[in-house]
Image: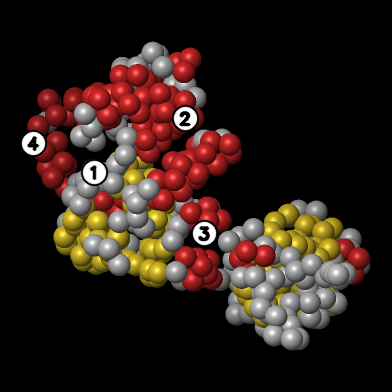
Amino acid sequence: MSEPIVVAERVGKRYRIQHQRDRQPYVALRDVLTQAVGQPRAWWRARRRQHLACEDFWALKDVTFRVAAGEVVGIIGRNGAGKSTLLKVLSRITEPTTGRLVLDGRVASLLEVGTGFHPELTGRENIYLNGAILGMSRAEIVRKFDEIVAFAEIETFLDTPVKRYSSGMYVRLAFAVAAHLEPEILIVDEVLSVGDAEFQKKCLGKMHEVSRGGRTVLFVSHVMPAVQSLCTRAIWLERGAIAADGDVDAAIHRYLSHSPAGAADGPAGQVRIGDELTLDSFEMSPNPVETGGRVDFALRLQAMQPARVEHLALLFHSIQELRVAIVDLREAGAPRTLSAGETWALGGSIAALPLVEGDYRVGLGVGTTAYAGDHLGLIDLRVAPRHRPGGHVPYAAPYRGVVELDYQLRS
């Protein structure tokens, strides 16, 4: 493995949060000024009574990792897990409270819409400004200028102040500058979600190109297929600490399978569905099931109050949260009216499950007259590889897609 270009050792970031102990009623400014002038002692005593309680919040705690030159690292985790704080620390926007951080090379970061742009300058002027901040010579910026403008698709507005740009135009130009001015380390936050689908595709392609050129990419995203397709490694952050670091598929599986404390929907073994129903039990067997094998399912719904079930379906998702199939359960008797306390038990089988081996999650889509929603990931379903006589070795599962076709060949 090559020498690390990014080193983080026991990095922590603490913020001081203040809480007002006694909630004060609203007081108009004129009343405050009147009291301050007319009764200064009483006003001062009242101010001193309004104590503020402080607490420490650690956005990052003992974060340690190393990134080699040319690695593409995805950083995943729930909102509030510390992902954006980590990128701000890596970008030198904020200093860590504890720990040591070493970056060996030029860093270009795209963290928020408009970061690093001067709103009064034009797009053309901001390209030169950003290049200078990155340490590029004027000749280097000129050499890359036409590529940046073509990639960002802002030729018409190149000499317009960027304060008049839409958020999408901001992002297109900011990403084009960050990616084309050849930094050794490119840091990209979820900001790419602002762009349209076609531009996101261009950005992912450019990051592939950047990584193939030996440069390092740190990429934060909630879109797991993008992380899986782009990254060679994933770091999962949970409550400011590293929960997993390594293989992309393994880290994503652990992240998506993790249920934070307090996430239960109802009493033990129950999942609450709206205000009317609970899912008392849900089973699939066998589990694991072989590709092409039979799998049975059974579930039981109970009404907490009178309810009319209009829609019902099993929902199959990949571990990257892409829906791959459904089983329409309406033929089992929906629409169906349940009285308070009544249960509805139903089941069935899939004669030949056509999914390629791997990990999947099975949930339930429910619609009543008062509620409609999907409850995903209720069951983790493992699909094992199909037995192949003769010792034939198939292509790797990710290469084959999701569905295992039942086909016959003629020579």
Q: Inspect the image, locate mark 3, and give the three-letter code of the amino acid beneath it.
A: Gln
Q: Could you tell me if the residues under marks 4 and 2 are in contact, i.e. CB atoms within 8 Å?
A: no
* Identity, as a three-letter code, of the amino acid under mark 2: Phe
Q: Which residue is mark 4?
A: 41
Which one is closest to the eye, mark 4 or mark 3? 3
Vertical comparison of 42 with 295: above or below: above
Decide if residue 118 is in sight here.
no
Residue 360 on image: x %, y %: 64, 70
Q: CA distance from mark 1 to mark 2?
A: 22 Å
Q: Quadrant of the C terminus?
A: bottom right
Q: CA distance from mark 4 to mark 2?
A: 65 Å
Pick the residue in front: 409 or 102: 409
Residue sitting at x 48%, y 54%: 230
Residue labelled with disc 1: 106
Q: Dot 2 lies on which element?
A: helix
Residue 207 in percent (x, y) is at: 44, 46
Location of mark 2 (residue): 151
In the image, 345 versus 297, the foreground residue is 297
Identify residue for label 3: 228
* Crowdedness near tag 3: few (<14), some (14–19) or many (≥20) residues, C-alpha within 10 Å: some
Q: Is residue 104 visible?
A: yes
Task: Name the secondary structure under disc 1.
Answer: loop
Q: Residue at x 37, y 48 (%)?
A: 213
Label 1 – label 3 distance at C-alpha:
26 Å
Question: What label does residue 153 carry, if any?
Answer: none
Residue 380: image quadrant is bottom right
Helix, strand or loop under label 3: helix
* Disc nearer the start of the sequence (1/3): 1
Q: CA distance from mark 1 to mark 4?
A: 57 Å
**Dot 1 or dot 2, earlier in sequence:** 1
